[in-house]
Image (cartoon, helix red, strand yellow):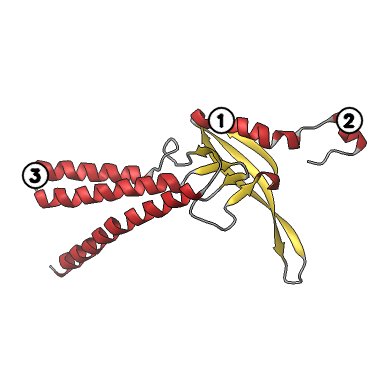
Amino acid sequence: MELKNVVVTIEGYFFYVVVLVMPIFATISVANRLRIKNVRLSVRHGMLAGYPLFPTIYAAVQLACIVVAYAIGDGESILKFLFYLLASAFWFVGAAAAEQRPVTNEGIVLSVNSRKNALLKWGSITDYFHKVKQHYTEYHFFYNTAKTQPNGKKTLIRNVAVVRVQNDQKDAFDAILKTELEPRFEVDPVKIFRGEFKP
C-alpha cells in the first residue's frame, strides 16, 4: 500500500509537470523559430520523415490508453489521458519548431533554441559532401573554429555539421547550395595554373 501511494504521488507530480511544461516549451520554440528572419527554406530535421518521432510515439500511446479506458468505462482515466494527449500535441509543435534547420541568406541555423554558435555561415563552410539515403539525404558541412590553447596560441579545430534533408525538400536545398557554395568551390584550371584558386 505504501508503494502504491508513492507511485500515485509521483504520477500526480508527473502529470502536472507535463501539462504545464509542454505548452511553455512549445511557446518558446515557436517564438524562437519566428525570430529567425530571411528564411529561404525550413528543413524538417525530425527522425520520422522529418517530423518529431518521440512526441508521435507518446501521442499514440495516449490514444491507446484512451481507447482502453473508454472500453472499461473509466471516465476519470479518459480525462487524464486526454490531458496527456493535449500535452503531446504541444510537445509535437515545440519539437517540430525546435528540430527545424532554417536556411537563411546568412547560412544554416543548426539550433533554433540555442543562440551560441547556432548559425553556420556560408562563408565558414570549407567543404561539404552528401550521402543519399532511402528517404532523405545527409549533408556533411565542414567548418573551422578557433580554440585558444593554455599558452595563448590559437589553433583551428575542424568541425562537421550534419543536416538531414527529406527527399521532397532536396531540390530546393540543392538550389540554395548551388547559389551559395558552388561558386566558391568551382575549380578553374586557369586559376590553378596561375595560383589564384583559393577554396
| Image location of residue 185, percent across then percent down | 75, 36
Q: Are marks 1 and 3 in contact (CB under 8 Å)?
A: no
Q: Residues within 10 Å of mark 1 (few under 14, many from 20)?
A: some
Compared with residue 179, is residue 159 higher up or lower down, i.e. above or below? below
| Image location of residue 93, percent across then percent down | 37, 45
Q: CA distance from mark 1 to mark 3?
A: 50 Å
Q: Are marks 2 and 3 in contact (CB under 8 Å)?
A: no
- Label 2: state its secondary structure: helix
Compared with residue 49, is residue 98 higher up or lower down, i.e. above or below? below
Q: Which mark is residue 190?
A: 2
Q: Which mark is residue 72?
A: 3
Residue that protrudes farthest toward the left in the picture:
73
Compared with residue 133, is residue 62 higher up or lower down, i.e. above or below? below
Q: Residue at x 53, y 35 (%)?
A: 165
| Three-letter code, disc 1 | Ala
Q: CA distance from mark 2 to mark 1?
A: 31 Å
Which of the two marks, 2 or 3, is nearer to us in this view?
2
- Label 1: state its secondary structure: helix
Q: Residues within 10 Å of mark 3 (few under 14, many from 20)?
A: few
| Three-letter code, disc 3 | Ile
The answer to whether residue 134 shows anywhere in this view is: no
- Label 3: state its secondary structure: helix
Q: Is residue 166 left or right of residue 96?
A: right
- Of mark 2 and mark 3, the one earlier in the sequence is 3
- Badge 1 is on which residue? 172
| Image location of residue 96, percent across then percent down | 41, 44
Q: Is residue 123 left or right of residue 1?
A: right
